[in-house]
Amino acid sequence: MPSFLVCLCLAALAACAGSRSGDFAGAPVVLISVDTLRADHLPVYGYRAVATPAIDALRRDAILFENAYTSVPLTLPAHTSLLTGLPPDRHGVRDNLGYRLDGKIETLPGLLRRHGYATGAAVSAYVLRGSTGLAASFESYDDGVEILADQPLAQIRRPGRQTAARALQWIEGHRGQPFVFLLHLYEPHAPYQPPEPFAARYRERPYDGEIAYVDTVLGEFLDRLRALGVYDRAIVVFLSDHGEGLGDHGEKEHGVLLYQETVRVPLLLKLPGALRRGETVRAPAELLDVFPTVLGLLGREPPAGLPGRSLLALPARPAKPLYSETFYPYLHLGWSGLRALRDERFLYIEGPDPELYDLAADPGEHKNLRDADRRTAHGLRVELAGRPVALAPPRASSAEERGKLAALGYLTSGGSVAPAARAIDPKRALPDLESLTSAYRLAAQGENARAAALLRPLVERYPGMIDARFQLASNLGALGRDEEALAEYERTIALAPMAADGPRIEEGRLLVRMRRPDQAAAAARAALAGQPEEAHEILARVAAARQRIGEAEAEARQAVAAESPPRAEAVLLLAETQSLNGRPREALDTLQPLAERIAKGERPPLRGLDFTRGDALARLGDANAANDANAADTAEAAFRREIALFPRDTRAYAGLAYLLASRGRTGEIDAVLQALAAASPTREGYLAAAAAADRLGNPAAAAAWRRRAAVGHTRSPLSGALDRR
């Protein structure tokens, strides 16, 4: 036999060997998930408007699956499907908020961990926080993404390069043993704000700019795997959880519709030694197939009942329709959910206005064939009808969760789940979705009146649009229209009794501010089972308002103990109550870890922290005359730092005024109160100045400030929620 034929035969045998089960027992497994990445925006899928040299190089070493799909165009449910090998109707996680993976459900990392694999993950978005149940399967789960509801959108995600660095640190420490690692990169999720030079290079296409940026991160990551000797012997799976609408079919982002642009995803599989490199598989595949594929390559049997099968069996295995769903419009908007089946040719979408598309003849899904091809539509409809919806109501979620996800652009209240699907087809109502997202954006910018003006007609048109009503109540409260806000919270609770804990918590906070302690306590107790941390916070504030300081501290301790790690706001509240109970040194010790994290740049400054430190230091100085001057100087610096960082926090001005009076610097007090009024020229600001003047023994000045408050200024949209005394 000629030598070149011998070489060809050996190469063919090697390629075939790479597809047998168990050939790669003990190989490292690296799962790379790039959030919100459309397959048709990558050069390896034919797109030419962006450069991705790292993904191109990986593709040359890998098998490319041309028609791969996610089960749901939402980050948390999609990753749960990836790790469990189950569709959302079987693992039960149907949305980014209000659902948690049951620890009894088998996962890929959990199974491999029991067989001696080290397991680690590093994620870039709060959506994949470990408390969703994902972390339980991993020995190490790095989800340290600090996201605050009032942060600018550009600051709410961990940059991909930082997450990749954390991943490489873990991998380097485990490269000598079998391991599985999940790296999740959040770019190119909205808002699309690529760093330079990509921002300038892709000025007209910022989504592509973020793809180009994340490609450089991947290139650095893969180069480091090569240098560590991991890449060549590893199974590397590159994918996305879902795509992005980009205006196709009217959807700008994702989660509402089930067309190709949001459900089709890139999928590359690199085998050890780059066996079968450069191959392309055109048969339909899905993310559910990754679980059995990896187990088969490692010589492990997948759990019984997994619907997916090995990607290496494509296209030989019999084709089956692939399932996808979204209940995001149902849970958040009062519209119908959508479910779909797609096979090698057809896509059928079940909703109030069903759709059928011939993907071969109409890949852009523009011509609905439901009436023209009734036989195909009926067959797919019958098959889909045999699949139970199995939608459980969402659990209660905290205000922190809601705030963080709202900052990421997700709707967050979670509506009630009615027995029958609602009759509004999402594709017919997309303009109203744009109005809702605009209202959220305006609210985040402090434009509460404009946000409320957009929301009012929405709640009239869609009474079941719980997110809109919930947001409207928040905007009304921020505008000082407390009675109207209270009425909207009550309507929200009545409309969504199964998801009422969130509205009850916000109602309780409003009632504290309105000085209605009995009603506030009742609202908090009603939400105590679902949201204990925030309910205990409200009860602590109610107790403080009633001058029951010991009870307030006890409630604050329960708030801190309710979550691990505790919310920063709960820690701050505990320090306040410790100081009020005559233990300012203990309060300072409680605050110290938070202050250190802020000083190191590990989290943004926390509103109220410097005020509370200043207050505790002032009390400490009063209690210890020997240290009075030093403590007072430090307290003054803390008050002034709070004013510089958060100029509308009226308490810091008042605290500084009291401190100056105690030090005999009365001539400086008027300037401080004038600065308070200039920073918060509202009824609340003037009343705060009046209260300070009263306490300082200046009734004439207090009366003057009250006259200014009576003119009719509205309450500051930012300071009211912080009325903690």
Image (tube, rainbow, N blue to C red):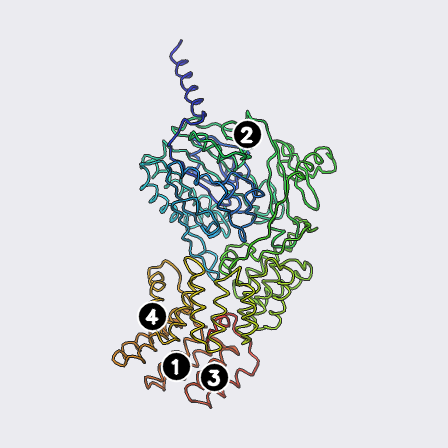
Q: CA distance from mark 1 to mark 2?
A: 73 Å
Of the residues shown, which amino acid type is indicated by label 4?
Answer: Glu
Q: Is residue 148 above or below residue 517?
A: above
The disc label shown at residue 598, or none: none
Q: Earlier in the sequence, mark 1 or mark 2?
A: 2
Q: Find disc 2 in the rendering and name its residue.
A: 282
The secondary element bearing badge 1 is classed as helix
Foreground of the two, 76 or 68: 76
Q: Is residue 254 above or below residue 18?
A: below
Q: Find disc 3 in the rendering and name its residue.
A: 690
Q: Find disc 4 in the rendering and name its residue.
A: 586
Q: Is residue 666 above or below residue 259?
A: below
- Give the mark toward the camera: 4 or 3: 4
- Give the mark toward the camera: 1 or 4: 4
| Residue 368 place in picture, x, y as percent | 69, 39
The disc label shown at residue 657, or none: 1
Q: CA distance from mark 1 to mark 4?
A: 24 Å
| Residue 454 place in picture, x, y as percent | 62, 62
- Give the mark toward the camera: 4 or 2: 4
Task: Identify the image quadrant of the N terminus.
Answer: top left
Q: Earlier in the sequence, mark 4 or mark 2?
A: 2
The secondary element bearing badge 2 is classed as loop
